[in-house]
Image (cartoon, rainbow, N blue to C red):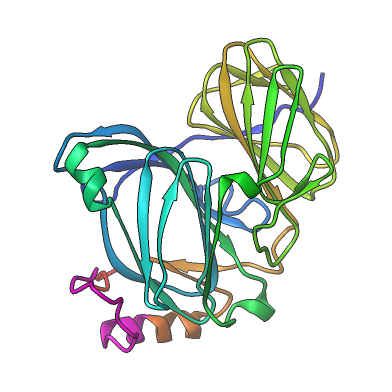
Amino acid sequence: MPTPPQILAPHVRDLGGFTVRRVLPAFERKMIGPFVFFDHMGPVAFAPGEGIDVRPHPHIGLATVTYLFEGAILHRDNLGNVQRIEAGDVNWMTAGRGIVHSERTAPDDRTRGIRMHGLQTWVALPRLQEAAEPSFTHVGRERLPRLEQDGVRLTLVAGHAFGLVAPTPTFSDTLYVAAELEAGASFLVATEHEERAVYVVSGEVTVDGHPVPEGHMAVLPDGDEALVQARSDARVMLVGGAKLDGDRFIWWNFVSSSREAIEQAKSDWREQRHAPIAGETEFIPLPDR
């Protein structure tokens, strides 16, 4: 019998008007490859007049990756980017030395009401790129590589896997794949990536015969292929890549190998030294702790 995977359970977090299930960082496991943060939001139905309002806030030392199954979000940042992301698209925002962004429900969607379901993850940058110039990239769903076989539909969100390479920018070896499975379908997760995990978005799923509940992440043993099988129609995400080049400190929205860099980021936000986002007047204050 294959070695059982390590199962990470989610923790519910309130982000101001809506909740998410957070599996990374976990007490048992801080990172999987370069992924240091993994939030699952929804599915949730917003009534007309309601929606998401994540006010302007800063990041350093990471890239945020947004991927939706349903709905849409309007991204704005202080580089001047304004981008609507819809289901199946990817927003990749490299914070580097510092960026400020907001995420809101667009006015038209708010008027109608909208369903929301998706993932937001943070990818820590290698030490040499932690202070890189900030940037933003939107990759439409039509540009993402896909593979369909035997009741399994795979979409490469970022990195490489299954002989495919995504156009999404990455800074280190990355595994990020969306998989939809019909009941009874299965596929193998190869050993091409140093660290790998399977997150169950929905459905009844086993990994090497071990059940993995919805909203939980199965961290795969090193060096072994793993069989992912669906007992019902299901959706999973493959997450991982090369082990990060050292530990990272995480404080609020800041990720860095340097405590000094985080202290500087705190000071910069407290004193509002960042360029503003055009059209935004609100912001999230620096928390007390």
Residue 227 drawn at (x, y percent): 77, 24
> Quarter holding the C terminus?
bottom left
Residue 279 drawn at (x, y percent): 23, 73
Give the residue at x 20% y 38%: 112
Q: Main secondary structure of the magenta part?
A: loop
- Which of 188/255 is in front? 188
Give the residue at x 58% y 75%: 257
Q: Is residue 51 visible?
A: no
| In this picture, residue 74 sits left or right of residue 207 | left
Residue 50 drawn at (x, y percent): 17, 43
Give the residue at x 62% y 69%: 125
| In this picture, residue 180 sits left or right of residue 89 | right
Q: Is residue 95 visible?
A: yes
Q: Which residues are magenta?
A: 266-284
- Which of 79/228 is in front? 79
The correct choice, above or below, for 103 with respect to 163 in the image is below
The correct choice, above or below, for 237 with respect to 141 in the image is above
Confirm whether the magenta stretch covers residue 261. no
Furthest residue to the left?
49
- Which of 227/84 is in front? 84
- Where on the picture, by quarter, is residue 150? top right
- Which of 1/229 is in front? 229
Q: How many marks?
A: 0
Confirm whether the magenta stretch covers residue 272. yes
> Quarter holding the N terminus?
top right
Residue 206 drawn at (x, y percent): 65, 19
Give the residue at x 43% y 76%: 99
